[in-house]
Image (spheres, rainbow, N blue to C red):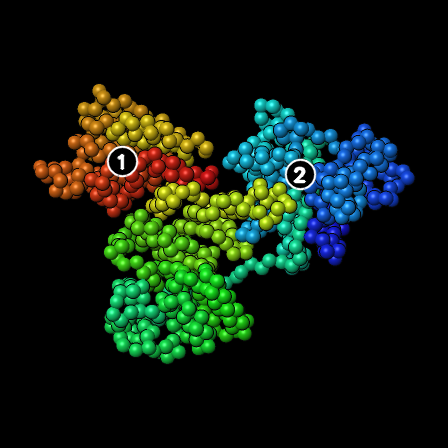
Amino acid sequence: MSMQEVALDLIRRAHAEGRDTLLEPELYTLLQAGGVPVPAFWTATPGAFPDALPVELPGRRAVVKVVSPAITHKTEMGGVRICDNTYPAIRAAAEEVVANVRQRGGDALAASVRQVLVGEFVVGDDSLGGQVFAGMRHSPDMGPVLAMGFGGLDAEEMAVRFQGGQGLVLTSPVMSSPAQMLDKLRESFLYRRVVGLTREARKRVDDAAFLQVLGFFANLATMSNTPEFGFVIQDFEVNPFFTAGGRLVAVDAFLRFSAGTVAQRSVPLAPIKTLLKPKTVAIMGVSGKDINPGRVILRNLLREEFPIDDIRVIRPDAEPIDGVACCPSLTELPWRADLVVVSVAAPQVPGIIAEVLATGKAASMILIPGGLGETEAGKADARRILDQMAKARAAGRPTPVLVGPNCLGIRSRPGRYDTLFIPATKLPLNDAPESRCALVCQSGAFLITRINNLSRLTPRYAISTGNQMDLALVDFVEAVLAEGAVDVLGLYVEGFGPLDGLRLARLVRQARADGKDVILYKAGRTPEGSTATSSHTASISGDYVSCIEVLKDAGALVTESFQEFNLLLDLAVHLHDKRIGGMRLGAVSNAGYETVGMADNLSQAPKFQLADYAPDTARRIQALLDANRLTAIVSLRNPLDITPMAPDKVYVESAAAMADDPGIDAVVVGIIPLTPAMRTLPPGVDPRGWDTIEGDTALPALLPAVVAATDKPVIATVDAGPLYDPLAQALRRAGVPTYRSVDMAMPALQRYMAYRLGRG
């Protein structure tokens, strides 16, 4: 029988008995069918022990264990004994383990013992690396996730003590092949220790043994949650594998399953395309007298020059507002609205949805109000709405897609509309050209603060998904990527619907294959997985950690803070078309402390370095120093400290020389603008009129040409107070990626470069 046939037969039998776990002999049988080494074993029924050993086990000792569907951790119940490999010793150990269970758990637990398993005592190694843990669990977000780490009773402690993927490696066995999983494993201390690459230099197993185990879990993950299989493998863990005789031998295992399958949502892209680029819009909740959210949204449409004849305000009094015609109700609209924006109180929403389902007057809807799906009454309303929509879709009736509720909605540049109802006095529009990027966020507040912070980015789409009652973040990601008009996606994720995380991972992988960048912040770092309390895997690989690792493997650049998200998104947009050729940097500053900071902030993993100048570069910079009488105080080195005596042109020509150097892959220009030698002040501050950023020889006039002329990344930093905000803004406006601290910008630049190189 194939592994799948064996697994299905074992699980069906267990399910028929009312069990949701497999017993250890069954697990040994499954592991054997999958090509994983297990100890030689036989079983006996308590009270009916055989008169002689039915199987001769190798070795001088044997292991005797209770077999019970009610006992997960046998050692804690005294259900495991090691004894001499003789009939009397084995029989006595069998009687002892059953007696221990009765003493510790009572007669009922003892009655649950179906068999006693007698197995070969595999000679293990108690030193670090002698035992390996492997566990696969079904994450609600990501589907099957595999964890491999140091095994034994301290497996969870080991996972905590070894950080950064060194003692515990997480990966998706459905997203990655066994060979790809092994490649990731090779980067860990766990792997190096087990295969003998550490100073201990003791080789326990080789790659073939790991591939054997990884292949087993990949096969198990592939069959789980499929219609053909009909079950979900919730947990399967082996703890430990002994590294014995060059093999990974499974000596203890646990499997928990559930009947049925978990469906993955699928949403047609056509309605989302209509939502993002509507030809007709209706708005509900527009005040005729005051400035309320609905009125702001209406004026936003007019500002974006959405055709006024294709807008309707829904109001019973039917009086025009801001020159826009009104309709008494959705039913009386002259056309089916591509988009209906609902900005009314939450209790009115169910009635509005019912009207839309009855009339078919909306292709898509943005639900602004909060409360729906949050309070108990709101949750009941949300359930009724979803039930009505499901029935309508099943019957083939026109049914809108919904954004929200509790959202700010969408700003769509190609759709010429903006439902972000924040007044322009609070969220000013910028004059930056449209960026080939999209922001998709589950938090409207996160969305608008990014827009406000990243003032030189104008996303093609800025999308707030709210409570995701219908459409989810991943639906918008799929639609935006399918359009093909963005190069960079910025995502803020709080949570996923069932398997939406796995769907997002697949989309990220395709995006990366198409040369797109995905910058992601995942909220919710509190360890999860407590629902699967019988599994070590759950506590070792919580949902947050699993999600992050799978998305990283897929190609997302996962950020650790809001500030890092801002920096990396900005860098990704501005440097997307730049060539990343390696990890060698050139740097220049006019302050000694900053050049030290540049060197201090070199990444060690992966390893970046400050490049040695090519001979021509060295000659150019030396000639520049000579011409500006800086030779006596400036040493020719990298980072180049040009001192406060250097004028703007020294910056520019030094950066140009570094950008032309074939041995330099990126240039960092650190600017301390307080020196009198440079033109860094806003206009009107210098009474002489000389020191102004608007001068022809100031950095905003000179440095942009260097950035535009090279295909390498060139960034600048301005480390100073508010007086020099105009300098930074002028550089940004002229196309120079500019940041306010070199010790934040350099790590971010290196993370982005490593990401582009496939090293981050």
Residue drawn 72% across the image and 47% down it: 70
How would you rate the neighbour count of disc 1 (Cα within 10 Å): few for under 14, some for 14-19, many for 20 or more?
some
In depth, the one of 98 and 421 nearer the eye is 98
How would you rate the neighbour count of disc 2 (Cα within 10 Å): few for under 14, some for 14-19, many for 20 or more?
many
Query: Compared with residue 505, is residue 706 higher up or lower down, i.e. above or below?
Result: above
Tags 1 and 2 touching, CB below 8 Å: no
Left or right relative to 440: residue 388:
right
Camera-near label (1 vs 2) is 2
In depth, the one of 467 and 56 nearer the eye is 467
Residue 452 visible? The answer is yes
Q: How many marks?
A: 2
Q: Which residue reaches farthest left? A: 688
Query: Compared with residue 356, is residue 723 higher up or lower down, i.e. above or below?
Result: above
In the picture of the structure, the residue carrying the numbered disc 2 is 239
In the picture of the structure, the residue carrying the numbered disc 1 is 719
Q: Which residue reaches farthest top? A: 632
Residue drawn 13% across the image and 40% down it: 685
Label 2 secondary element: strand
Of the residues shown, which amino acid type is indicated by label 2? Asn
Residue 79 pos. (x, y %): 75, 39
Of the residues shown, which amino acid type is indicated by label 1? Asp
